[in-house]
Image (cartoon, rainbow, N blue to C red):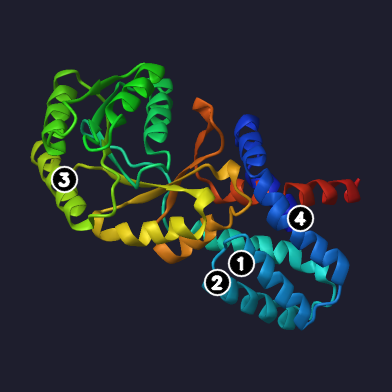
Amino acid sequence: MSFFRKLKESISGKTESVTKQFRDGLEKTRKGFVEKVADLITRRKKIDEEFYEELEEILIGADVGVNTVMTLVEELRAEVKKQRIEDAAELRPILSGKLMDLLRGDDDNSLKENPDGITVILFVGVNGVGKTTTIGKLAHRYKQEGKKVLLAAGDTFRAGAIEQLEVWGQRAGVDVIKQNPGSDPAAVMYDAVQAAKQRNVDILICDTAGRLQNKSNLMEELNKIFRVIQREIPSAPHEVLMVLDATTGQNALTQAKLFGEKSGVTGLVLTKLDGTAKGGIVVAIRQEMNLPVKLVGLGEKMEDLQPFDSQQFVHALFAGMIDEEEKAEE
């Protein structure tokens, strides 16, 4: 059985709507990346030095990351030698298989929950990456699952941040715990945890300030928030999710490194993946940060925030090739 046929069968248990969301959401990346690879394979046919150089350019252009691309191409060279491949078309399933291996990692991509009470999820990230929108969509997702959700407006620094979170709270049908702008974020978190306990809440989702220009203050603020939450719920926060804007490409990777694992980040959320042709940044971030991508934004609707799935991602990218192969087999 071919790689692409196996790939299709491996995700056959997923709902058709989720598969379509990934496929539609990755259309720009598919055109800017996979279709260019397909064109290269059709044009060149022969695997020579020029073929590898052009492949490197396409992968780097899709923001897969220079280091990752170099390793990937070296591995492809080794496979070509080992399997004595002469036809470039035979490289397509090998390339897609290697991309899936790079994305998969050892991590469980699902969001961790507290089996003994309130699950606390803390969101971090710079302004403008879609943090508040993601919080609103995640609250909606949990609500649809029948969970009782509460939001905490911990970004007391940015003008309009509290109001923006309240708007998303109304859309999702969940309450928001807040204080006045300029208040101590740790005090907001304390109030939110107390309210969550009183209301028997399942999920408490907390927003935090998104400013990087004064990193030491931000880290101190986050540490204080951690202490306040942990004093009330010792196992919390159960997830610290860093939100990154996929359309910024390598800048997203730089932001992730600036925050780093020192801020306790447990996973990443990539927003606006549908708005970029550089979806290869998912691979670069997964490789260089050693952190799992847990959620991806594939559009503007409430339902367009999806758990990240490496098989779905690769299947959506190579959808055209899978269709071609099926036609050829008929």
Sequence-first disc among 2 and 3: 2
Task: Report which residue position mark 1 lands on.
Answer: 60
- Give the number of the mark in front: 1 or 3: 1
Residue type marked 2? Val
Task: Report which residue position mark 2 lands on.
Answer: 66
276 or 13, which lies in front?
Answer: 276
Quarter of the figure that contains the N terminus = bottom right
Give the residue at x 24% y 60%.
262
Q: CA distance from mark 1 to mark 4?
A: 15 Å
Residues marked 1 and 3 touching at CB (< 8 Å): no
Residue type marked 4? Glu
Would you call the spot at circle 1 few (<14 residues within 10 Å), some (14-19), or many (20 or more)?
many
User: What SS does tag 1 mark?
Assistant: helix
Q: CA distance from mark 1 to mark 3?
A: 38 Å
On screen, residue 13 versus residue 188, left or right, reads right
- Give the number of the mark in front: 1 or 4: 1
- Label of residue 226 in the image: 3
- Give the number of the mark in front: 2 or 3: 2
Quarter of the figure that contains the C terminus = top right
Q: Position of residue 165 (x, y in %)?
A: 33, 27
User: What SS does tag 4 mark?
Assistant: helix
Would you call the spot at circle 2 few (<14 residues within 10 Å), some (14-19), or many (20 or more)?
some
Task: Report which residue position mark 4 lands on.
Answer: 35
Residue type marked 1? Ile
Q: Quadrant of residue 49?
A: bottom right
Residues marked 1 and 4 touching at CB (< 8 Å): no
Considering only vertical position in the picture, is 15 above or below 31? above
Considering only vertical position in the picture, is 56 above or below 312? below
Sequence-first disc among 1 and 4: 4
